[in-house]
Image (cartoon, rainbow, N blue to C red):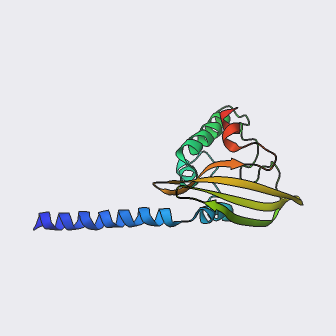
């Protein structure tokens, strides 16, 4: 009797876990980016909790961001990220923010975020990767040429 109950509980928990994975993958690339900008990812770039980075970025990119933040915080210096990665700028006054998916394939996508910052029109392109946990940001390309991976890797 106890064995049947335990098996039933395990089956139910397995189903719940599988459903959660499927739901995570169903979140579209543009919804993930929208959540990041709407403030659900507001404290992503802080050294209190790496889990927030993992919610939005691939492991590779989250690890590089984390390393830069932790190493610069320890030395009281500005790291390689001397700007807000979501806006590609040090100072921000954002208006007319728009998010648009421009390409989606089986395991990759591109999302463009356009806005005016201090009155100047700007676009940022997000390269997305579909992971086991769902869509994640794999790189960010800024309007003036550099990309986040290149900046963080010091290339």
Nearest to the observer: residue 12 or residue 91: 12
User: Residue placed at 74% from the left, 54% from the top?
Assistant: 124
Side of 145 where 31 appears, left or right: left
Q: In which quarter of the image is residue 68?
A: top right
Side of 21 where 85 appears, left or right: right
Residue 146 percent coordinates (x, y): 76, 42
Nearest to the observer: residue 33 or residue 145: 145
Q: Quadrant of residue 65?
A: top right
Image quarter hosting the N terminus: bottom left
User: Residue placed at 71% from the left, 65% from the top?
Assistant: 99
Residue that sits furthest to the right in the current view: 119
Up the image or down, 125 lies above or below 61; here it is below
Nearest to the observer: residue 74 or residue 80: 80
User: Residue placed at 60% from the left, 37% from the top?
Assistant: 67
User: Residue placed at 67% from the left, 59% from the top?
Assistant: 111
Side of 92 where 13 appears, left or right: left
Residue 128 percent coordinates (x, y): 60, 54
């Amino acid at each position: 009797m106890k064995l049947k109950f335990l098996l039933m509980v395990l089956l139910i928990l397995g189903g719940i876990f599988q459903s959660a994975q499927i739901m995570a993958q169903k979140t579209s690339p543009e919804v993930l980016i929208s959540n990041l900008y709407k403030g659900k990812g507001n404290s992503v770039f802080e050294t209190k909790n790496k889990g927030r980075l993992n919610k939005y970025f691939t492991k590779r990119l989250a690890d590089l961001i984390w390393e830069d933040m932790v190493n610069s915080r320890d030395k009281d210096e500005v790291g390689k990220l001397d700007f807000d990665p979501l806006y590609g700028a040090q100072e921000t006054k954002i208006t007319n923010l728009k998010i648009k998916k421009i390409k989606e394939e089986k395991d990759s996508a591109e999302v463009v975020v356009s806005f005016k910052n201090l009155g100047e029109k700007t676009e940022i392109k997000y390269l997305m990767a579909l992971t086991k946990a769902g869509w994640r940001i794999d790189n960010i390309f800024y309007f003036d040429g550099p990309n986040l991976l290149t900046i963080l890797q010091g290339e």
